[in-house]
Amino acid sequence: LLAAPGAPVAVAAESVWAPSPAASASLMETEVSDAVLALAKGEMMEARRHAMAAGMSAKSARQSYEDVLAAGQKYGKEVGQGVLQQIQQAAAEQAGEAVRLRLRWEEAIRVKARAAGVRAAGLYEQAQLRDVMMAGTWSERSDQFRAAELQEESAATQAGTQAQLYRDAGDSEGADVFYHQAETAVALSKRYAKEAEAAKEQSAAISKNSEVYTVAIQAASARAQWANTPKDVPPDPSLLR
């Protein structure tokens, strides 16, 4: 049946279904719950990924920290060992230089001490030289007296021969003159012999005394060197002989 124009159309109950308000509310709650669960699950997964990433980052950071710490310790040991070697080398060089400076200073001290020893010994050397020259002079005088003695002996012999010739010729007066000359020559010869012997003894005594100067020279030199050498400086090796 067609309805009249403008009349309301009647719809059959069987053809269109409309949920009840309670059903609609239950359906909405279910959909919302599923959405919330899906959202929560997604957030949980995201949080888990962040947590895992954070864990990996923490582990990586710790490993990096441990690596850096180990490297620092190793480097520190290597650097420390190198610095220690440098310090030891520098100390050895400084010690060697100090020893060289000390040895040069000690040698300079010994040079000054030897100069003082030379000055101290010089006085005795001059005295020794004086006595040696004096002994030589007396020895020369002894030789001169010995020559005069021999000359007078020869003169006495000649005068004696002449005296004998004059006596043999019967000239007693002439013989007496030559006898007197011979006696004078003999006396002079004996006198010169004594002078020669005395000069010889004087020369020998002076020479003997000059030997003492040798010891005095060594003692004066050593004493002056010891006096001019500090106690902490080894003395000249020649002083120990």
Image (spheres, rainbow, N blue to C red):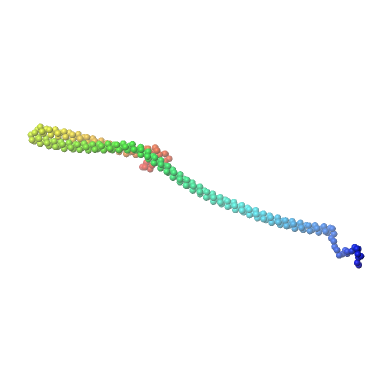
Q: Which residue is situated farthest in the bottom direction here?
A: 1
Q: Residue at x 17, y 36 (%)?
A: 152
* Corner quadrant of residue 125: top left
Please count the marks in the image. Answer: 0
**Rendered location of residue 148, percent (x, y):** 19, 36
Q: Residue at x 50, y 48 (%)?
A: 86
Residue 75 to residue 226: above or below: below
Q: Is residue 33 shown left or right of residue 52?
A: right
* Corner quadrant of residue 31: bottom right
**Rendered location of residue 122, percent (x, y):** 34, 38
Can the viewer see residue 209?
A: no
* Corner quadrant of residue 237: top left
Q: Which residue is situated farthest in the front direction here?
A: 5
Q: Which residue is situated farthest in the left direction here?
A: 170
> The C terminus lies in which quarter of the figure?
top left
**Rendered location of residue 169, percent (x, y):** 8, 35
Q: Is residue 85 shown left or right of residue 6?
A: left
Q: Is residue 155 shown left or right of residue 140?
A: left
> The N terminus lies in which quarter of the figure?
bottom right
Can the viewer see residue 238?
A: yes
Q: Residue at x 84, y 58 (%)?
A: 21
